[in-house]
Image (cartoon, rainbow, N blue to C red):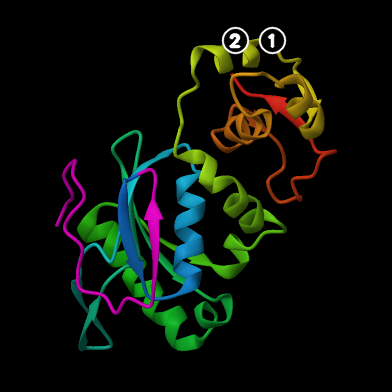
Amino acid sequence: MKLGRKLPHTSRVLALSHFYSCKNKAMHYCESVLETDALMTLEFDPHVTTYTTQPFSINYAIEGRKRRYTPDILAKYGDNSFKSIEVKPLAKFQQPKNIKKFTVLRAFFQRELDHPLILLSCADIYQGAQIDNLKRLYPYCQQRTLNKAQQHAYHQLPEQLTLVSLITTLKNDTYSAYHAAMQLVANRYLSWDVTTPLLDTTMLTKVY
């Protein structure tokens, strides 16, 4: 089975948590909070154009026994490539039975589906303050395009400045300076090491 340009329909899932995607403009149902936090990282990944959860199921065999498997996420990238993603705590990936299982599955995906199966653990997702920062910024992702006043203000910014300096510089009677600052950071007009806390003193760099 090879995937076309569109994502396949979502398979059935035991929904224990949910996440609204600004990128997809759709609600996604997940089986764990870890999965919803994985989706948060995809929202901020500039290479990911869209994604879906529990996208399809496949049949495979391990040690002569037939098994069925559904990846947690299927992500589509800007170059029209795909990656399936399995999300689990690191300790579960390190269990001997899962090492054997995912060795077989990763080979199957590359051979039969022509795209990789990525193993995403809590160690990958919870890097420093990354998730706390992304959750704080996420409400400001819904409006991704800057208006003319914001574009003008952005182009007048220095190459580097602190968050508090950004807010002060953006003070304007027509919009909230704090909201405008957070919108710029959330939509990657300004960058910093996302694994460190976003503080007033954090140094931000313009992105072109």
Residue sitting nearer the eye, 27 or 35: 27
Name the image quarter holding the N terminus: bottom left
Question: Who's the residue at 32% across and 51% down the image?
Answer: 51
Residue type at mark 1 is: Gln
In this image, 5 relative to 62: left or right? left
Magenta-span inclusion, residue 19:
yes
Q: Secondary structure at mark 1?
A: loop
Helix, strand or loop at disc 2?
helix
Q: Residue at x 72, y 42 (%)?
A: 193
> Quick one: quadrant of the C terminus?
top right
Q: Residue at x 72, y 59 (%)?
A: 128
Q: Residues within 10 Å of mark 2 (few under 14, many from 20)?
A: few
Q: Which residue is mark 1?
A: 156
Task: Examine the residues drawn in magenta and state their main secondary structure.
Answer: loop
What range is drawn magenta here?
Answer: 1-23
The residue labelled by disc 2 is 152
Per the model, the C-alpha gap separating discs 2 and 1 is: 6 Å
Q: Residue 76: x and y, percent?
A: 32, 45
In magenta stretch: residue 172? no
Q: Does 7 sit left or right of 73 as displayed?
A: left
126 relative to 50, above or below: below
Q: Residues within 10 Å of mark 1 (few under 14, many from 20)?
A: few
